[in-house]
Amino acid sequence: MAGSVLVLNATYEPLNVTTLWRACSLILSRKAEVLEADPEREIRSPSTTLPHPIVIRLVSYVRVPHFTSRRITRRALFARDEHTCQYCGGRARLTLDHVVPRSRGGGSSWDNVVTACAPCNLRKSDRLPHEAGMPLRRAPRAPHPDLYLTLGTRSIPSVWHPYLPARALAFVEDTTELPFAA
C-alpha cells in the first residue's frame, strides 16, 4: 500500500499527512472516518473492504501542542524561500547558505540560513552579506507551521485543497496529481 492521506482533526483543521497504512489502521479502529476516497480504488482484505482514503477526519479532538520550530532540512528551507536564491533570485543549483558564516560564529538556525544558488554561495564565501555587496531579498525567519503540512508528500491531490490553508498550498509547485497515482 502506497500513498499519502491528509489527516484532519475532529474540528476539520489539518493535522498532518500520513501513510495509507496508518490511515487504514485509524479507520478500522474507528478512530477516524473517511471524508474523501478514490472512487476507482478499494482496500481489500479477506474479511473487509474499505474505500481508498484520500482525506480522513479523527473522530475525537486531538489537542495540538503549540508549534515549536522544527529542525532545518533542505526541503523545508527551499520551500520556505520558494525555491529561489535569496541573493539573486535564481532558481537553479540551489544550496544552503549561512548568512553569518559558521566560521564567524553563525549557527544553523532558521534566522541564519537561506537558500542560495551555488554561484552566489561561492561569491559570498565566508563574508557577511553587506561585506560581499549581496543584500538579502528578505530576512530569514522560521517558517509558518502550515509549511510542514505538505512537505511529506510529493504532490497534493486537488481533493485536499478545500481542507488546506492557502499558505500550505503555496509551497507546492504541482498540486494536480494524486500522490498514489502511478
Image: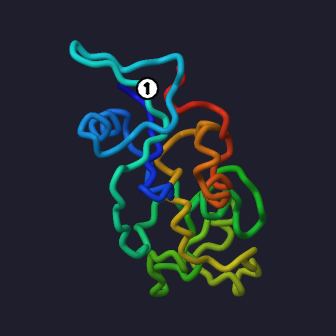
Which residue is at the front of the view, 126 or 57? 57
Q: Amino acid at mark 1?
A: His
Q: Residue at x 29, y 41 (%)?
A: 26
Q: Which residue matches tag 1?
A: 52
Which residue is at the front of the view, 39 or 178? 39
Residue 127 pos. (x, y %) = 61, 81
Q: Residue at x 39, y 40 (%)?
A: 33
- 51 up-or-down from 156: above or below: above
- 41 up-or-down from 106: above or below: above
Q: Is residue 119 left or right of residue 53?
A: right
Residue 17 pos. (x, y %) = 44, 47
Q: Is residue 94 left or right of residue 73?
A: right
Q: Can residue 74 be seen here?
A: no
Q: Secondary structure at mark 1?
A: strand
Q: Is residue 182 left or right of residue 174?
A: left
Q: Residue at x 42, y 55 (%)?
A: 10
